[in-house]
């Protein structure tokens, strides 16, 4: 099970403190977004054209180098940029990701990577990110990876992923979650929404077969 006690605390924080973290509507250009409205194969927002899996290298929570493009290649991968001190957008999004994975078959969880990249280079150490991610990965066998780096490295990673570069010391950041398929392309993205959990749970099996 997902760790409900910690999640309950996080969701109380979401309800009480709503001003400190700002999520921009979408890091993708308007021409790239395709509102499926239930007509396409995906329940998230379609990307047209599809985006190739980006290449960038950052540092994981154990202090080791992590090459995103190489180490997640061929795996369904959810990529999200945010920061651990965010009281609303980030914990809500990560809760939805964890809950969506928990509802899927273990064989699919085993294949899937969830990569969280901090936009707060000053405060988010490896230990801080590791503790924070532990609130969301319980009960799944997916590979949760937390990444950090210098400001220049984080900015370059966001640019490579076609995500709007965060501002205000990382506190104003894109709310988008990109989903890459086993073919190493992202054809769907999730701006913050009330049914993000259900959308991800529906779309992950589809991209795993792509």
Image: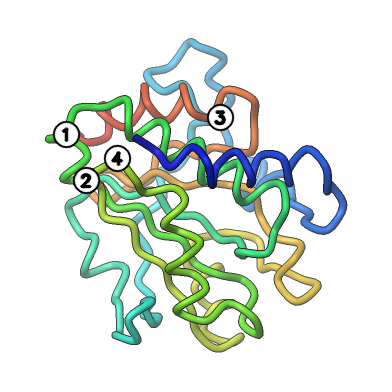
**Residue 34, which numbered label?**
3
Q: Nearer the viewer, residue 49 or 23?
A: 23
The answer to whether residue 196 is left or right of residue 54 is right
Sequence-first tag of 1 and 4: 1
Q: Nearer the viewer, residue 12 or 184?
A: 12
Q: Position of residue 106 (x, y in %)?
A: 16, 34
Mark 1, residue position: 106
**Does residue 56 lie above or below 10 as drawn?**
below
Disc 2 to disc 4, how far (Cα)?
Answer: 7 Å
- Circle 4 crowding by C-alpha within 10 Å: few under 14, some 14–19, many from 20: few
Front: mark 2 or 3: 2
- Please report contact status of discs 4 and 3: CB closer than 8 Å, yes or no: no
Disc 2 to disc 3, how far (Cα)?
Answer: 31 Å
Residue at 27%, 34% in the rendered image: 207
Front: mark 3 or 1: 1
- Please report contact status of discs 1 and 2: CB closer than 8 Å, yes or no: yes
Mark 2, residue position: 141
**Residue 139, which numbered label?**
4
Tag 4's secondary structure?
A: loop
Q: Position of residue 133 (x, y in %)?
A: 45, 58
Tag 1's secondary structure?
A: helix
Residue at 29%, 85% in the rendered image: 64
- Circle 3 crowding by C-alpha within 10 Å: few under 14, some 14–19, many from 20: some
- Circle 1 crowding by C-alpha within 10 Å: few under 14, some 14–19, many from 20: some
């Amino acid at each position: 099970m997902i760790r409900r006690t910690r999640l309950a605390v996080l969701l109380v924080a979401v309800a009480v403190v709503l001003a400190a973290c700002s999520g921009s509507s979408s890091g993708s250009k308007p021409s790239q977004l395709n509102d499926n409205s239930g007509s396409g194969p995906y329940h998230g927002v379609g990307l047209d054209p599809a985006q190739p899996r980006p290449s960038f290298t950052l540092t994981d929570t154990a202090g080791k180098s992590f090459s995103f493009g190489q180490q997640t290649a061929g795996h369904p991968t959810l990529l999200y940029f945010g920061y651990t001190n965010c009281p609303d957008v980030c914990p809500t999004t990560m809760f939805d990701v964890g809950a969506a994975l928990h509802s899927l078959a273990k064989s699919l969880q085993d294949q899937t990577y969830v990569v969280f990249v901090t936009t707060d280079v000053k405060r988010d150490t490896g230990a801080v990110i590791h503790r924070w991610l532990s609130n969301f990965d319980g009960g799944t066998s997916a590979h949760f990876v937390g990444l950090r780096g210098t400001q220049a490295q984080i900015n370059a990673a966001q640019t490579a992923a076609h995500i709007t570069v965060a501002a205000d010391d990382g506190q104003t950041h894109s709310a988008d979650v990109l989903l890459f398929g086993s073919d190493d392309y992202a054809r769907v993205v999730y701006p913050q929404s009330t049914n993000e959990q259900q959308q991800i749970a529906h779309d992950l099996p589809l991209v795993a077969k792509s």
